[in-house]
Amino acid sequence: MDYPAETRRSSSDKQSLDNKEAKGFANSNGDPMVLKTQSIDQTDGIIDVNELSQVLDEAEIEAAGQGKGTSLYLWALTAFSAIGGFLFGYDTGTISSVLVVIGRDLDNRVLSDGDKEFVTSALTVGAIVASLFIGLVGDKFGRKWALLFCDIVFLVGVIIQAACHQKMVMAVGRLIMGLGVGGAAQLVPVYIQEIAPAKHRGRLAVLNSIAITGGQVIAYAFGAAFANVTHGWRYIIAIGGVPPIFQAIGIHFFMPESPRHLVKSGHYDEAEAALTKMYPVATPQEIEAKVMVMKRHIEIDDIGTVRKVKLLWTDVPTRRAVFICGALLFAQQLSGFNSLMYFSGTLFAAAGLNNPTATGLIISGTNCLFTFVTAGFVDRFGRRRLLLITMPLVILFLSVTAVIFYVMLRPTDQQLLSGFPYPGYQTSLMLVFMVFYVASYATGLGAVPWLHGEFFGTQTRMVGTSISTACAWSGNLIISSTFLKTMTAITPSGAFGLYAGLTFMFLIMVYFLYPETAMLSLEEVRSTLDGGFNVKKSLKVRREKLDLWKKQQAEQKERAQSA
Ligand SMILES: O[C@H]1[C@H](O)[C@@H](O)[C@H](O)[C@@H](O)[C@H]1O
């Protein structure tokens, strides 16, 4: 459809434009974001598009046509793009099992702790690099083509690793794979957030976290299955080549571009078609309104890469977003979960558990299972509340694990010695508390920080999330490259105690600075950071929205009953 300066609407549509009133925050200029109490009935059905998008509450436009739930197509699309998350999980998950069974296959010698950390961290370095540039690729060529690029890179990384015989070649393969992993980690949540309706945005985005953690479980399962197969680790890695091929084909034939990107590149018809499929109960007018709002934003947004990057610092609310999102993703990593993800095989083998890879499966399985809990609660319950409940539990269970380690390792002078007969009940107790720790991590810190795209305006979403994603991978690098050495330097109990202390520090930050974003439209979320971190205000707006939503639900029910 051509978008003329004027759009004709039916009188019932006009009615629905009357007396709009929605409370929001002040924008960065200090103007209230109350959008808007104004009648345009006098326009005899002809509405200027700019006027229209100013008159309509953008939150309402975002909500328009969503019906009772989210369309099957939207779920399918989210699940399909989350294959990127699955690859992130699978490729970070395989290393633990690979390191256990790799034996003398590289350079014809057993890998040292340093070698293991080196090979493990190579992927993370690649991921940091990718997260810093993939946002620009996604902005220029579109989210889906950037994701296709990641799939190709994944494949190259898989082939190099599965065929390698030297540590250095393995590291190069992991570095290349890291480019794909980091790219997907950055693109997929943003793509999902851009297509998702406000009410279910959290849940849909958490689907990506489920894919990540599910990928890790499957990596462990294959690890266990191939544990006794000669050169089984090569098969474990090679299997990871299947999903990128599948996704690449799907991207070509089925996946629509993010409507926002389509509008940006002037493909209004395609944007409309994509939105119509995503919101099957929306009227053509509602779809039009959505496209118009996007168009208006994009006109304001199109400011060039250098200015966008500058805005990360010069625009104060955006700077706050970079800080809070980067810090939370950093906190996620410094809570130490990936030390278990990458090294639980090595750790449990040293502690004397018979099947270390299967034990790792318990860890990754718990992580995945509890991410479903997040999906169930993140919108209704709120992101902030989930964090404030689960982070103290993370601290508690990490501390208990530290104490158990302390007691268990007394006979070996606080060093974990492979082959020492540690009492079985102590090792099992350690496993139990690690499982509690992982469950609380997965319900909050594991998934919520990946909703970071919400805090940025469309201008800065890609570059802003690039920075916070890079913070996640930097934290990951710190943990993966130091965990084994930290355990030697400050003892295992010291290492887990350290993670507990760091999480405590970040809990204080969340309490004072992390606003609630559940139920708010992307625009409202963005404005929560105007003039401060506005924690109290965000809670108030969320409560109002929730009340309104409940009221609407009750009215709908009443209408349905009386009909
Ligand atoms: O959100 C994910 C998830 O928690 C994964 O299990 C973990 O390995 C990643 O590092 C994290 O970013």
Image (cartoon, rainbow, N blue to C red):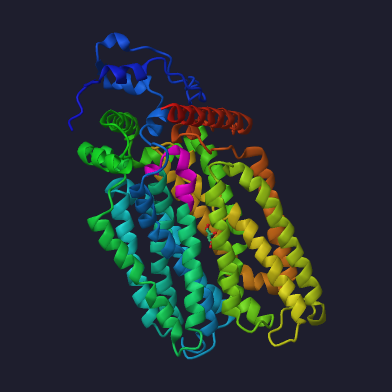
Image quarter hosting the C terminus:
top left
Residue 311 lies, in percent from the top left, at 44, 37
330 relative to 278, above or below: below
Where does residue 184 sit, x and y in percent of width and height?
A: 40, 57
Residue drawn at x 47%, y 77% as measured from the top left? 222
Residue 59 lies left or right of residue 323; in this view the side is left
Q: Residue at x 78, y 76 (%)?
A: 408
Residue 149 figure quarter? bottom left
Looking at the image, the residue that sits furthest to the front is: 562
**Is residue 235 positioned above or below 393 on the image?**
below
Q: What's the magenta region?
A: 194-206
Task: Name the residue rendered at 32%, 43% in the picture.
Answer: 278
Pick the residue in front: 523 or 159.
523
**Left or right: where does residue 369 sit relative to residue 184?**
right
Image height of 190 relative to 283, above or below: below
Q: Residue at x 24, y 15 (%)?
A: 45
The majority secondary structure of the magenta stretch comes to: helix
Left or right: 156 as drawn, with respect to 347: left
Q: Position of residue 179 (x, y in %)?
A: 39, 63
- 199 within the magenta span: yes
Could you tell me which quadrant the N terminus lies in? Answer: top left
Outermost residue, left side: 2
- The answer to whether residue 322 of the structure is visible from this angle is yes
**Residue 98 can be seen, yes or no:** no
**Residue 292 drawn at (x, y percent):** 29, 29
User: Does the magenta segment cover residue 69?
Assistant: no
Total number of numbered labels? 0
Query: Who is closer to the viewer here, 488 or 389?
Result: 389
Q: Is residue 215 above or below residue 69?
A: below
